[in-house]
Amino acid sequence: MEKIVETDKNYNTQKIRAAFEFANKAHGDQKRSSGEPYIVHPLSVASILVDLGMDTDTICAALLHDVIEDTDYSFDDVKEMFGETVAMLVESVTKITRMPYFNEKEQQAKNFMKILLAMSHDIRVMIIKLADRLHNIRTLDFLPQRKKLRIAEETLKIYAPMARQMGMYALYDEMVDTAFKHMDWFAYSEVEHMMHLKKEKREEFIESIIERLHKELEKCNFKEKPEIYGRVKSIYGIYNKVYKKHKQIEEVFDKYAVRVIVNDINECYSVLGVVHNIFSPFVDRFKDYIAVPKSNGYRSLHTTVMSRESIPFEVQIRTKEMHASAEYGVAAHWKYKEGIQKTDDLVERMEWVRTMIENQQVSDDVEEIVSVLNEDIAKEEIVVLSPKADYYPLPKGATPLDFAYRIHTNVGHSAVGAIVNGRIVPLDYELKTGEVCNILRSKDPNKGPSREWLKIVVTNHARTKIRTWLKKECREENIMRGKTSIEQELRRLRIVVSAEEMDEFLNDMVRKYLSPSLDDFYASIGYGGISMQKMTARLIERFNKRIDKTESAEEGFVPITAPVKNTGSNCITIDKIDDVVYKLAKCCSPVPGDDIIGFITRGHGISIHSKNCVNYVSAVKRNSPEDMERWMEVRWTDNAQPVKLSTNIEVMAVDRVGLLFDVARVISESHVFIENLNSRHLKNGNAVVDASVQVDDVEQLNALMNKIRKQKGVISVDRARK
């Protein structure tokens, strides 16, 4: 209550106190995993929301958000005591809970859709849920490891991206750093060490920049003295650029940033002039998010400049209102305005929620929604102009088709071409910032999108509109196309299902995708609502349920969900057998150039192993006739087209700061794709780095291992065996 009293908002303290007392009584003797009274959690969530400036009903709902789910009190009890609005908020938050679905990915996706639906009714539901998740992730240390990892992953994939999409960067930065720390402590520590080594110099550098800016800005006639802050990019942000984008840490230009906050827009541009006058700007790294805000409403000037010490850093310039919006996002509407202002930009900023829900109605694959959210957020933005000089922000890689659908659905449906900067371009042309795009339209009123357009567009919005049209206008064609696609995929996988058994065989998937009938299921595949790429794994999974899997499990082999995809000719030649399904065993991950042997599995085709695989070596030692008759000679096809195959290596080295980074750098410089990379500390002062990589053949793999052996402190580099 002290925090509430200290704010300048007109809270109904009597109602909030009553909500606290009610929650305290309801939770009674319940304890959290840490052993502290359960009421500490709703109190902490409410405290976060007070910092965000949320209203009385939201604070009350935060205090009560677990009452309906975890106690004997009902929706009607809460409604009677605190009114319909508070009860609705509590019930909506309660509905966003874990439920038993087929797998964790699907479960996350289902939860995500429930969140979107709740948000569409009242955005405060999501703000409460984000505050709830923020406190939960702050207290992960008390949970079992498996649950800790699940919550951290869910936070990175769903809650943090949603906080960013809502413009709530203060919550986003803390969420991603904390979740990342729990998911990959070694990588987190590696980046932290890299930054810590230069901590003193870093602080000294930032202070010198702030001091110089203050000195220069004092010469300008600003209404008030500008506020200047220094910051360092988040650990997770640096990790993404260093490890995922394979950059040196020196190439991360925005790891240091200075933020200048002024009174109005004119002063923003005045500060920009001063900054460019005293520091050398990078011409291609200036972003004007004031003239063209980000899709989540973010507004600011960004410019990257070079200091006298030849250190690049970013300067962000914004007004106080823009700063509040950047820190608190949609919550700023409560912190700095009285309630929900329907006339302001809140409705426009939450347009993406409606688009996401609309997309789910035509995608029929709820897991895709989560990946779409992450993809949309991860992409850099460009700005494209219409012939009337209207600005349209689009993700990098957008095409004229994306631009057409951004203007209006009918413009997209009728598009036949485009003129960009005065010259005709195809519809799959990649637009660039500053280009003027004019869409050429068909005069045929019945003109509609082509199915091939789904391969051209990159925006979720355009893809949704195309699918919606295809779903509505081409049902019979979609059914035939979907049925044909399923039959072709079954033939490719060598799965034989008779026409009489087909309905029963696909029945599980029809239920899984909530299709009213098998024809609706086929239609969803036909118009692209269900991805055939995901269907491959599920067809194999369904087939595997019909066969006895115990035998291969007894032999100690790791099951694989799909055969290797061939690009042209087969990678493997199997003696006396043509066109057989095979897979590369994960226990030894053979690559072209290894001596290999095949094992006949029951229902899984041929499993390909290296001849020094522990499973094959053990079988040879046992020399059992029953065992040995299932091993058969196989060889790599000489004329096979190159196929990237996964394999694992294990690096033993003296533990030191920068070890993981050096290994990652060598792999990246060798143009080898990294699937997974982690390290673990040993008690003897050494460390083991495990890397999963994709290579063309054993020659490329050996060359890579030789390069790693030359790194400081490396003791050995070997193929990893499972």
Image: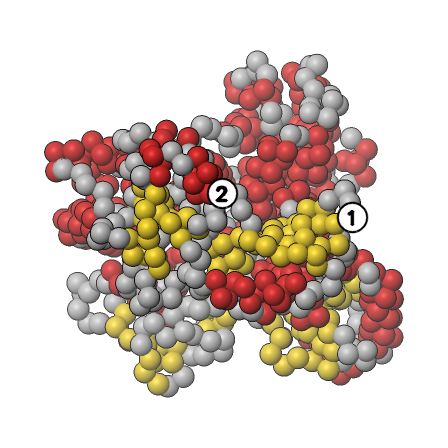
- Residue labelled with disc 2: 614
User: Height in image: 409 above or below 475?
Assistant: below
Position of residue 455 measured from the top left corner of the image (x, y, whole percent):
32, 63
Q: Residue at x 68, y 74 (%)?
A: 304
Residue closest to the eye, 443 or 97: 97
Can you say whether 101 is above or below 340 in the image?
above
From the viewer's perspective, is the residue at label 1 or at label 2 nearer?
Answer: 2
Colour mapping: secondary structure
- For label 1, the SS is loop
Dot label at residue 685: 1
Amino acid at the residue labelled 1? Gly
**Quadrant of the image for the N terminus?**
top right
The residue lying at 33 percent from left, 53 percent from top is 634
Type of amino acid at the residue the image marks with label 2 = Val
Where's residue 8, x and y in %?
Answer: 77, 42
Q: Give the left or right position of residue 582, taking residue 718 as reference.
A: left
Q: Is residue 24 visible to us here?
A: yes
Label 1 crowd bin: few (<14), some (14–19), many (20+), radius 10 Å: few
